[in-house]
Image (cartoon, rainbow, N blue to C red):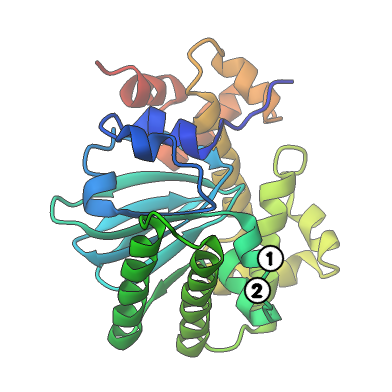
Amino acid sequence: MKNSIKIINNYEYKKLFLPDVSEHNLFNENKIQVYRIENYLRSILMPVIPYRTTFNFLIFVTKGSLTQHLESASYTLTENQVINIKQGNITATLAISDDVEGFFVVYENEIVTDIELGINDIKFFNSHPFTTLKPHVAHWIQQMLMLLEEELFTEGRVMEVCISMMQCILLKVIKSDIETKAPMSRQLDIAFRFREYVQKFHIDHKNVLFYANLLHISENYLNKCVKEATNKPPKQWISEISILHSQILLQDATRDIAGIAFELKFQSPSYFTRLFKKITGYSPSDYRKHKFMAG
């Protein structure tokens, strides 16, 4: 079976979506990379097709707006808002306003693994990737990113200093995020763990009971927790995540729709087509034409 996810590394991302990227930025392989959104993403080719990223990146908007798809949700960032995309996530940039400004920061896993994080801190990376910063925190992070940017472009840069600065920035965002959110309840925790399991097992397991058993709770209680935490029942999450993966497969024009339905283990191609249209508003064939074959 072919891999159902188009995996893209940092170099491929720049090559595919940023036609005006400079040679310096294209071949930049530093552990930390800081770019200004207004320059870096100015000529991004839209729509960006959903892809699975092999790199971590943080988007911090200081002006205007940017809409980012992450897994099965979309987030519109405006002034002082941050989103973190971790390695392995499925993501895509959906929209950028003409006046957008901010920072696009790429960083390696080791930057995070070297920070001592508590259980609530880790939730920023796993279940709370989007946050609104208080103005004074946003100002502090903006100043730090400008200093980090300056250090990275200095001829005699000290990488250890850059790593420490990036760790401070991440910690500041994480701690600010925790301050603005109430401690996670058991129901919320179950809902987020459910979503992580669905990302992992949705191809082979589309029934809610499977996930309830994984979480050692009843199917009714799982339904209650997920519905209250996300305003969607578990079955809808499973369907939406499966359809998101099918959208990635549809990028390959050589694959037939029935084959995609069977690869993702839907009960039949006709059921897959009905579900796809219900969730996206398009039939799979119309979606493919509309999104990837226009012009």
Q: Residue, x 27% and y 53% (percent of image)?
A: 37
150 relative to 22, above or below: below
Q: Residue lying farthest top?
A: 254
Q: How would you rate the neighbour count of disc 1 (Cα within 10 Å): few for under 14, some for 14-19, many for 20 or more?
A: few
Q: CA distance from mark 2 to mark 1?
A: 5 Å
The residue at which mark 2 appears reads as 115
Q: Position of residue 2 (x, y in %)?
A: 69, 21
Q: Secondary structure at mark 1?
A: helix
Q: Residue, x 70% and y 29% (percent of image)?
A: 267
Q: Position of residue 254 (x, y in %)?
A: 53, 10
Q: Which mark is residue 113?
A: 1
Q: Is residue 275 left or right of residue 104?
A: right
Q: Is residue 132 visible?
A: yes
Q: Position of residue 118 (x, y in %)?
A: 69, 81
State yes or no: discs 2 and 1 in contact (Cβ < 8 Å). Answer: yes
Nearest to the observer: residue 21 or residue 154: 154
